[in-house]
Amino acid sequence: QVQLVESGGGLVQPGGSLRLSCAASGIIFGFYAMGWYRQAPGKQRELVAAIPSGGSTNYADSVKGRFTISRDNAKNTVYLQMNSLKPEDTAVYYCHADRTYPIKVDYWGQGTQVTVSS
C-alpha cells in the first residue's frame, strides 16, 4: 500500500518560514520524481516545485528564490523549505510521486494546510 504522508503545515505570519515534509512508503522512492503542489480555495491545483530522481529542480515562478525542494532517498522523504511566506501562499499543499517507466503511475498525499496571515 502506497502512502505519502505530509507534515509541517500550520499558521505563520507573513515573512515567516515553514518546512513541509512528505514521508513515502510502499514505493521504491528513488525511482520516482517527487513534487509539491498547492490548491487555494476556488483555484486549480498548481505545481509549486518538483525534484526528479536525478537532475535539476523545477519551481513555479511565484516561489522562485523563496522555496527550496529537496529529497533524502535514504529516508524516503521529500521536503519543501518555504521562506519569506506571503498571504498568497495560503493553500493546501500536496505531495506527489510520479514515474513514467515502465508505465505511468502517480500518487498523492492527503494534503497539509498552510495559512499565512497576521
Image: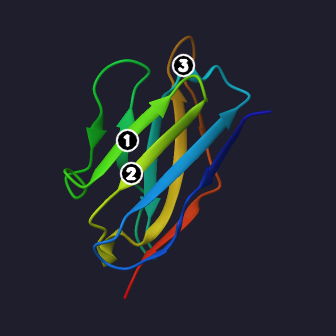
How far, Cα to Cα, is label 1 from label 2? 6 Å
Residue 66: percent from left, percent from top: 24, 55
Q: Secondary structure at mark 3?
A: helix
The residue lying furthest to the bottom in this view is 118
Q: Name the residue at 56% across, 11% down.
A: 102
Q: Is residue 46 left or right of residue 3?
A: left
Q: Is residue 94 left or right of residue 57?
A: right
Picture quadrant where residue 22 is located: top right
Q: Which residue is mark 3?
A: 30
Vertical side of 33 occupied by 18: above or below: below
- Amino acid at dot 2: Gln
Dots 1, 2 in contact, CB < 8 A? yes
Q: Secondary structure at mark 2?
A: strand
In which quadrant is the N terminus drawn? top right
Q: Could you say which disc has been placed on residue 69 in the image?
A: 1
- Amino acid at dot 1: Ile
In which quadrant is the C terminus drawn? bottom left
Q: Name the residue at 28% across, 26% down.
A: 56
Q: Name the residue at 31% across, 20% down.
A: 55
Disc nearer the start of the sequence (2/3): 3
Residue 50: percent from left, percent from top: 37, 38
Q: Is residue 103 left or right of residue 90?
A: right
Q: Secondary structure at mark 1?
A: strand
Disc nearer the start of the sequence (3/1): 3
Vertical side of 52 occupied by 58: above or below: below
Picture quadrant where residue 30 is located: top right
